[in-house]
Amino acid sequence: MLDDLKHCKKAVGVKQSTKAVENGVASNVIIARDCEQRVVRGIIELCEAKAIPVTYVDSMKQLGKACGIDVDAAVACILK
């Protein structure tokens, strides 16, 4: 899953990922386990409501690196 992030269309960050889920263009959401739950609670609930699968990774650092960015990321999503 993480290897796919570098080479596919994606949205990175809570705001961009939330917009992608709301607009129906996200196929899968990836969330870092070490992020603050208050930050991702909304997108988790939105994914449950829209039946979008959520995958968890160990750390924000790992997710940011997989997305090809130089900072940590709490959330990313793969676009359809």
Image (cartoon, helix red, strand yellow):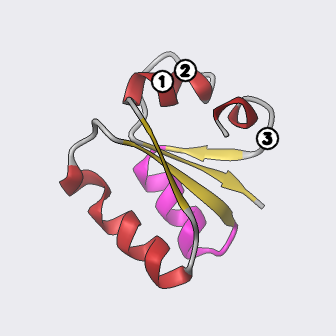
In the picture of the structure, the residue carrying the numbered disc 1 is 62
- Can you tell which quarter of the image residue 29 is in? bottom right
- Contact flag, marks 2 and 1 (Cβ < 8 Å): yes
| Left or right for 55, reference 3 | left
> Quick one: SS at disc 3?
loop
- Residue 49, given in percent of the width and then of the height, sits at 46, 83
In the rendered image, the quadrant that contains the C terminus is: bottom right
Asked if residue 21 lies in the magenta stretch, the reply is yes
Give how far apart the Cα atoms at labels 3 and 2 are. Answer: 14 Å
Q: Report the residue at 22% width, 52% height from top.
A: 37
Q: Is residue 67 left or right of residue 31?
A: right
For marks 3 and 2 on the same chain, the one whose residue lies earlier in the sequence:
3
Question: How far, Cα to Cα, is label 3 from label 1?
Answer: 17 Å
Residue 16 lies within the magenta run: yes
The residue where tag 2 is placed is 65
Q: Which residues are magenta?
A: 13-25
